[in-house]
Image: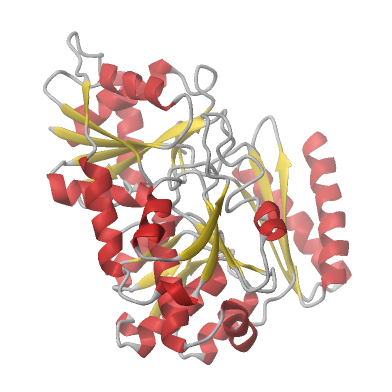
Amino acid sequence: MKKYFGTDGIRGIPNKNLTKEIVSNVACSVEDILKPTSVAVILDTRDSSLEILDWICEGFSENIEVINYGILPSGSMPVLLETFGHNLGIIISASHNPSEYNGIKLIDENGSKLQDEIEIEIEANIENISLPSAHTSYKESEEGFKVYFEFLNQILDFDLTNFDLLIDSANGSAYKIIDELLKDNDSKFKMIANEPNGENINLASGATHTENLIKNLKKGEIGAAFDGDADRLIMVDENGITCNGDVLILLIAKYLSSTNQLNNDVVVSTVMSNFGFKTAMEKNNFKNIETAVGDKYVAEAMLESNASIGGEQSGHIIISDKLPVGDGLLTLIYSLKALSFFKTTLSQFREDNIKEYPQKLINIELNSMPDIKQLEELDNIARVLSEKENLDGRYLIRNSGTEPLLRVLVEASEEESVEKFSENLVNKIKNFLQT
């Protein structure tokens, strides 16, 4: 079990459970184990991001160069590493979490998130290190924005004027670059949640809160919502229906297949994917490889199977020919490219290609997370209940890797069954955890 790293880096509330001591010690241990000489840093729009950058610099010795490229989507990091020759990347962000949270994600020189084994080694090594007597300081650069903009712009090789877009940037790291990119390509678009103030990132907006996007959507428009660091994308079709990662992965996979770019006909997803998604995979003769929740596990499976696309229902989607990590802006470009190629609308594609089971995800806030034994007991409680109620579907109970939440997913063929089973299951879970 890891002490600091979750499924997507280290997160917490700065100066509470994410302290200067933790961040500086992790940076010091990273220097000892990975031995970087040049580090690229990007931020999201949280007030605490620059303070955390100072903590990082206090953990690195003066031998390490640190370049702060400012506010940029996390998908830009592999581009920066390759272009400028850094051998480590650090993303200061808590992604979709509320503004009071923040965190760090470590990216290796190939642009990928660190493997679990390395994160465990970094944590264990903290006991053996001392902070440097002379630490580094960072320099600032605007060059990262330019090279990432050009990277995206080169992929926009189709006519955007056929789409009316409503973009929700979650007051996060995509707010500036998506605006300039769409303007540069003569797109018809409007922006909401695009005025970050340091405290409003993800606030009633973005990929995890699409209600505001749906409310502002006009007839004929397509909605696109990013999260705080813009590594995920959720879209809303012309009828106001949410299209999650399952729909977008299928859309892009069919496009890649139709243009002979889908390696081995493999598509990687996680255990969260809907039964309707799995049915669509079979219908299209795609081989679906399933992983644990977490885009880093998707990325590892994609590398092992040489897959062109993989992702999560939550909107983390990796298109490996372009980037080794998820990037919401790249996903948006490829989604629109696919719709343009098929000469269809998002609503029509969804209707023609995927029939999703009703699904409900409940997040239970906890002061302390269940251990492995307790999770096994909860799973047994759910199994007994599913047999009793003859559930025509499935359930999934797991600890969040990014927040103090127990996530409970229920899926069934009928909405009524989902509601009844999920209510009964959540009550039983709460009763068990209180005893």
Percent of width and height locating residue 237? 62, 72
Q: Residue at 46% across / 24% down in the picture?
A: 48
On the question of residue 36 being in view, the answer is no
Q: What residue is at 71 percent from the left and 38 percent from the top?
A: 365
Q: Is residue 251 left or right of residue 152?
A: right
Query: Is 373 or 167 nearer to us in this picture?
Result: 167
Image quadrant for the C terminus? top right
- The answer to whether residue 193 is visible is yes
Relative to the observer, which residue lies in front, 131 or 129? 131
Q: Residue at x 61, y 84 (%)?
A: 348
Residue 175, compared with residue 35, is above or below; it is below
Instruction: Give the x, y percent position of residue 264.
Output: 32, 84
Query: Is 251 located above or below residue 204 in the figure?
Result: below
Give how far across and how far down residue 343 sits, in percent: 48, 88
Figure quadrant of residue 70? top left
In the rendered image, residue 362, in percent from the top left (x then y), is placed at: 73, 52
Q: Is residue 382 left or right of residue 284?
A: right
